[in-house]
Amino acid sequence: MKLNQERICESIRLNTGFEDRITLIGAAMTDSSSTSKYVNFNTRGFKKYLVKRGDLNYGSGTVREIKSDNVPSGNRGVDYALSATVDSLQVTSHLPQPGSRIVLKVDVEGFECKAISGSLDYLSKVQIEYAAIELGYVRMQECHQTEGDPLAKIFDLFVSKGLEQYLFSDGKWIKVDHVNWIGWARKRSVGLFDTAWSKEMPTFNL
């Protein structure tokens, strides 16, 4: 995690004018803020691919939220992060103001459902121009089956913003039916896939 933070900071430094426009927040975005919930970055879920891939990128692991009053050792925001919601950050100056036009990128190792669920109030107040989200059939099923069906609420929010769902498949973008998502998602039940919510067909390749 520390290495990834350093990479982000270096990228910001290399792009003139971004220093005062980006805030790196050392918190785990989830669906409910709590001082007794956290994500530990020094777990096997984040490190299991290091030996296999031979690098220090903690991606491709799985995020699991831990409920405990015992905070892990190490530096907060580097070795672990307390849980927070994007909605709870509305009282700070870290988020674009209501009415702002934003682009959303969500790729948080299986925590997409909780991260977006904890952002719905804020996201309802801004203009979402485009949203890119890494998903998978299993992740979508888990989100759908959670009490209250957060997946439907997330999809409804994007639809209310005038966005349509697209899937990147076989080297190109295709429009998919967000209502009948089980059909096209189940065909890709093994692994993950990139989706986008856009006002028109995306024109770039991944």
Image (tube, grey):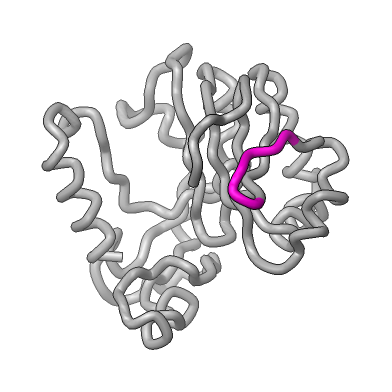
Q: Residue furthest bottom?
A: 51
With respect to residue 43, does 197 lie above or below?
A: above
Highlighted magenta segment, given as a residue range = 170-175
In this rendering, position of residue 23 left or right of residue 175: left
For the N terminus, the image quarter is: bottom left
Q: What secondary structure predominates along the stretch shown in magenta?
A: strand
Name the foreground residue: 58 vs 72: 58
Quarter of the image holding residue 57?
bottom left
Residue 50 seen in this snapshot: yes
Q: Is residue 79 above or below residue 112?
A: below
Question: Where does the image place residue 123, in percent across and percent down from the top left?
Answer: 55, 27
| Horizontal and vertical percent position of residue 27 | 38, 52
Total numbered labels:
0
In the image: residue 97, left or right of residue 202: left
Percent from the top left, x then y, of residue 102? 45, 24
Please tell me whether residue 172 belongs to the stretch shown in magenta.
Answer: yes
| Residue at 46% in and 16% down | 98
In the image, 27 versus 18, the foreground residue is: 18
View extreme (top): residue: 99
Residue 114 in sight here: no
Q: Position of residue 97 (x, y in %)?
A: 40, 18
The residue at 54%/50% (across/down) is 30
Give the residue displayed 75% in from the left and 60% down from the top.
188
